Amino acid sequence: MLGSGWRTAAARMGEVVAEVPMVELGGFPEASVAGHGDTVRSIRNGDRRILAFMGRVHLYEGHHPNVVAHGIRTAVRAGCRTVVLTNAAGGLRPGMTAGQPVLVSDHINLTGHTPLLGPNDDRLGPRFPDMTTAYSPRLRALARAIDPDLEEAVYLGLAGPTYETPAEVRMVAAMGGELVGMSTVLEAIAAVHAGAEVLAVSLVTNLAAGLGDDALDHDDVLAVAARSAERMGGLIADVVGRI
Ligand code: HPA
């Protein structure tokens, strides 16, 4: 699942054997945010098969959490056992810099939503999923073996679409959030629920509001992501190649 600015990463994953617009698969809405693609690629990498979602559905677009999680559930039902989530995030931990990839070690879901609300569909997963190791220690170790400079951090998910106020950023920090963003947590919940192993990588595109010098702008976020695309693409391709 490739977030803002991560799309070029897909080019390094292997041979594309099919590409279909998500809308044609059913259950996906039209894409609406600049920088987010709208196709799913089926990629062959040796004896591995990869489904790369060239964009994602966000809560702030007005979609139900089940629609946000639809891609994950579709992938898992299609046979995917590992889910790799990427995103752009604001960095809060001192020393973080724009352009730095960070492994998500854990999350705090402050979106106020979950894709598990309502009667549980036992075919998908259990009523009360354990989230103790939601972000697979095994996959994080594998990513760090490839790039020992990778740091880990707690991602705090908010609904957006406003970037945070400086007061909200102080709140996020006080709660233990080290990265802040508008995606990933609902997808991670759906993936854990469905029994998939999850790896999430954030690209720090900016210091969270009030910590940097400038106001936040989506175009700047995309520009930082584009500049880091090569390194990110290599990292994700290497990790996927070794899963
Ligand atoms: N806040 C929330 N979402 C984001 C940010 C941020 O600072 N940067 C990129 N996505």
Image (cartoon, helix red, strand yellow):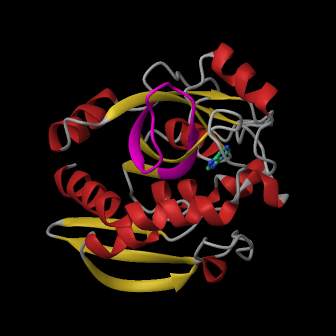
Residue at (73% x, 49% y) in the render: 215
Depth check, front residue: 24 or 161? 161
Q: Looking at the image, is 81 positioned above or below residue 149?
A: below
Residue at (81% x, 33% y) in the render: 112
Secondary structure that dominates the magenta span: strand
Queried whether the magenta region covers residue 88, the answer comes back as yes
> Is residue 87 visible from the viewing direction of this image?
yes
Judge from the rendering whether residue 59 lies leftward or rightward of residue 131; answer left or right: right
Residue at (25% x, 41% y) in the render: 143
Asked where in the image residue 169 lies, by quadrant, the reply is top right
Tell me where residue 188 appears, x and y as whole percent.
Answer: 54, 40
Queried whether the magenta region covers residue 109, the answer comes back as no
Tell me where residue 76 appears, x and y as whole percent.
Answer: 47, 54
The residue lying furthest to the top in this view is 174
Q: Looking at the image, is 33 positioned above or below residue 67?
A: below
Start and end of the magenta stretch? 86-105
Depth check, front residue: 181 or 67? 181
The residue lying furthest to the right in this view is 62
Depth check, front residue: 109 or 97? 97
Tell me where residue 184 appears, x and y as whole percent.
Answer: 58, 45
Depth check, front residue: 37 or 24? 37
Residue at (66% x, 79% y) in the render: 23
Asked where in the image residue 13 lies, by quadrant, the reply is bottom left
**Total numbered labels placed on residues in the image:** 0
Judge from the rendering whether residue 170 lies leftward or rightward of residue 162; answer left or right: left
> Is residue 124 visible from the viewing direction of this image?
no
